[in-house]
Image: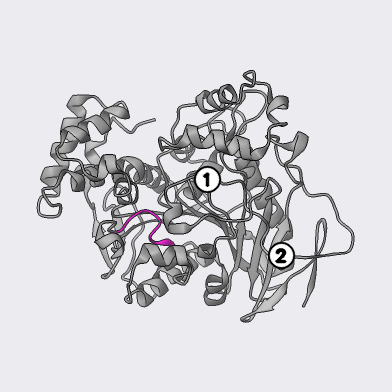
Amino acid sequence: MTIVEVNCGKVKGYSENNLQIFKGIPYAEAPIGDLRFSPPQAKKPWNGVLETIEFGPCAFQGYTPLENFTGKLQPESEDCLTLNIWTPAIDTKKRPVMFWIHGGSFIFGGSRSPTYDGSHLAQRGDVVIVTINYRLGAFGYLFIPGITANVGQLDQILALKWVYDNIAKFGGDPDNITIFGESAGAYSVIALTAMPAAKGLFRRIIAQSMPVIDPKVTKKPTKDLMRALRIKSGDIDALRKVAPEEIIKTQNEITKQGGLAFRPLIDGETFPVHPLTVFKEGKCKNIDLMMGTNMHEAKLFTSLNPLTRDIKDEKAIELYLGMVRINSEKARNIIDTYKEARAGILSNEPKELLDSIATDLMFRVATLQILEAQSKYQPNIYNYLFTWETSALNGMLGACHALELPFIFNTFDDPGMKALVGNATNTGSLCENMMDAWLSFTHNGNPNHDGIPNWPTYDKKSRATLLFGNELKIANALFDKEREAWNGIMEI
């Protein structure tokens, strides 16, 4: 096996299926003790050869009901800042690099998940795949102004800088890096466009199911955590002495109501402005962009929650919209617009209406806003909608959040994905076509290939969207009346 010398020492991986694989490479010092809640520190040089044949521990995990599908990742540790590489060869070929940031509501997930195995993409596309860990929950997103903010995002940036500096030694091209991620990972890759420390470290972005990026800065989760632990507000030294398990236990109480309590915050320094502003001002004009959502994103959440699974009337939808500060008149207009525009598509069940509205509110409208802003400056802009529906839970999940992941990585053998995908046997060609679109985009900024219809760029005139499902087709101005119903509501 080839030994590779990186900027902080020598690493030794292993060979498998015509790939060279390195797992658990540390890119930062362990963020423990005085380094807990601090920006990551670059890994100090080590002596000898470091064996990198096993995944490092994942970040400490917060609780989520989705564990029923995915299981709980183990082991977990504060010493989690590692990355993994799959490459076809250790040479000077300069292959495109795909840098993956995992999702999980910024409280769970990790690069050791079998869902994110990079083997199939690396083999099929002659690319280098990198997956990373970063700090999650309070460990990554505690916010005390002037003391700590967004260190989970700074972890991602340091990992990206490590890749930029070292990936040529693994057969990759540092000037052709695509950052891609799903859910919180998509939130992250779009957030990185507005973070000065990440400037120049990537060329392309693929954002899968990006949650709406909240412009509001809040200290409440941090204050709630410290109050519950009986620590004086802002006393970070005291918090550094608390056992991580105790912090997670308290964090779980704060996050059990859902939402992204701990998340990247636009603090004015590490993360100065909202990404939509950056795109509108043309500051990302040199970045190729592909974004998309799943047809029934919200069903993964509403179908698992008894409060939303069994709603009986539209009043519940009005209450839901009121919770996100949409007044009753605007809420009524949204409901009526969806009922009219999707007559014949939706059943008469209020739950179906809620799912459609919540999907757009949480994911699709914000995605289209970014695409629309970038389309003024960059021709390589592409929008997709994933429509393939799972049979899991008697079909009640539809084309839900995260369902596209095994189609991108070809990881249907992952037990968590098996539970989500159900008993489907018709996944092969769709998986290949999606992988090839992602790979083609990574190679040249254009996802088109022979297996799909001609996929036009996204612009305000046609609003072209490629539907990935049992049928592959292009739709123009898809669900446009629904999109317009959010005008003046989703602005930043």
Residue 439 located left or right of residue 80: left
Foreground mark, 1 or 2? 1
From the image, tell me which residue sits under label 2: 168
Residue shown at 27% from the left, 58% from the top: 398
Q: Is residue 402 magenta?
A: yes
Closer to the camera, 274 or 360? 360
Residue 150 located left or right of residue 361: right
Residue type of the residue flagged with mark 2: Ala
* Disc assigned to residue 308: none
Closer to the camera, 202 or 393? 393
Magenta-tinted stretch: 399-405
Q: Secondary structure at mark 2?
A: helix
* Disc assigned to residue 188: 1
Q: Is residue 451 visible?
A: no
**Image location (x, y in percent) of residue 448:** 40, 68
Residue shown at 25% from the left, 62% from the top: 394
Q: Is residue 148 above or below residue 129?
A: above
**Image location (x, y in percent) of residue 217:** 50, 26
